[in-house]
Structure formats: C-alpha cells, structure tokens
C-alpha cells in the first residue's frame, strides 16, 4: 500500500513502466491518473515517479526491489491485461464519476468544449450527430460519445467482472 503522499484528492497517482502501456491506457479510461513513458530507463522512471509522488506499476522484479520504491510500488503479477486491470482495481478501487475524464493519449484531464469550437476538428458526420464534446488541453485531441464509447464501457465491464 502506498504512503499518503501518493494519494491526491482520495485518488492514487501512478507511473506505469514500459511493460504496462495497455494497462496505463485502460486505467486512464477508468479515470486513474497514470503517467507512462515507454522511452525512459528505470532510473528516470524512479526519479520522475518520486518527483510526482506516484506509485510505480511494474512487472519488473529488479525494479520492484529498488530501495527508492519501497512503499511506492505495486507489482502487477499477471501478463494479461484483463487480470492486470482487476489486480490494480482491487488494490486501488477506481473512483466513481471519473470514467472517461482523462486523455487516453497523454493523461491530462479533459475539458468540456463547445460544439462550435470543434466543427473543423471532427468529421462532418460526427459534428452533425453529436452534441457534446471534450478536448485535451495538452495534446488537443477531441473526444465525443460515439459508439466507441459504449464499446469501451462494455469492454471495461467485461474486464472487471468476477470470474
């Protein structure tokens, strides 16, 4: 279990190692704050996680043994994404109301934006059929509640169900 500095507003903050990119993305879908950079070495990951007061998610047995990570790491046992997500959600239950509130690409908190502001950024059909949009203030990616949203929620429910 992490120390209290890794909890912000009741929510744990994480840094996923390079083996856990899919897990980072699915955790962001659930609203977890998960940093992920597959291009850094272990030393840099530990430094950045400590600076950001984040729990390191890893499958690396050597990384988990580092003194700097004592009390600040979570070892993910499974190599399958469904079980990985269940492991983390069991240890750190996702907070209600945060589903699909983070950018899946860069982890920033999404902001609601006006429909008119995205007219030139989304396909014409999307603009004509969707009423609500959000955008990432960091990477400027635009999101809307199309059929992919329902599929993602269905997939999450399957991944997190018992059995």
Image (cartoon, rainbow, N blue to C red):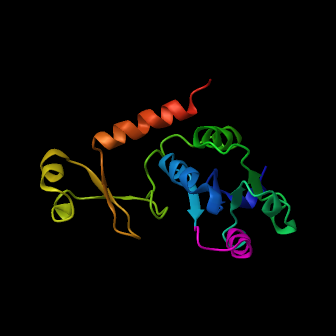
Residue 46 sits inside the magenta stretch: yes
Please determine whether, in this image, residue 29 is positioned above or below residue 87. Answer: below
Nearest the camera: 137 or 84? 84
- Quarter-wise, where is residue 78 in the image? top right
Does 126 sit left or right of 64 as displayed?
Answer: left
Percent coordinates x, y for residue 158 in the rendering: 50, 30
Q: Main secondary structure of the magenta part?
A: helix
| Residue that protrudes farthest toward the front in the picture | 79
Magenta region, residue range: 37-49
Percent coordinates x, y for residue 125 in the rendering: 13, 50
What residue sits 77% from the left and 59% below the top? 72
Percent coordinates x, y for residue 160 in the rendering: 57, 33
What residue sits 16% from the left and 65% below the top? 120
What residue sits 58% from the left and 58% below the top? 34
Please determine whether, in this image, residue 45 is positioned above or below residue 17. Answer: below
- Count of numbered badges drawn on the protein: 0
Nearest the camera: 48 or 7? 48
- Quarter-wise, where is residue 15 in the image? bottom right
Does 151 sit left or right of 123 as displayed?
Answer: right
What residue sits 54% from the left and 52% below the top? 22
Nearest the camera: 155 or 1? 155
Please determine whether, in this image, residue 124 is positioned above or below residue 120. Answer: above
Q: Quadrant of the C terminus?
A: top right
Residue 14 sits inside the magenta stretch: no
Percent coordinates x, y for residue 151 in the rendering: 37, 37
């Amino acid at each position: 279990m992490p120390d209290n500095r890794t909890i912000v507003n009741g929510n744990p903050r994480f840094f996923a190692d390079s083996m856990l990119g899919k897990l980072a993305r699915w955790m962001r879908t659930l609203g977890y704050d998960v940093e992920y950079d597959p291009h850094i070495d272990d030393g840099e990951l530990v430094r950045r996680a400590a600076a950001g007061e984040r729990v390191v998610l890893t499958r690396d047995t050597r990384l988990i043994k580092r003194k700097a990570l004592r009390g600040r790491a979570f070892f993910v046992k499974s190599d399958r994404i469904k079980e990985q997500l269940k492991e983390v959600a069991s240890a750190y239950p996702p907070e209600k109301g945060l589903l699909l509130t983070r950018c899946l690409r860069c982890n920033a908190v999404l902001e609601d934006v006006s429909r008119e502001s995205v007219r030139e950024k989304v396909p014409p059909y999307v603009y004509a059929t969707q009423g609500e949009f959000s955008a990432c203030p960091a990477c400027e990616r635009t999101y809307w509640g199309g059929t992919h949203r329902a599929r993602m929620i269905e997939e999450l429910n399957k991944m997190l169900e018992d059995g």
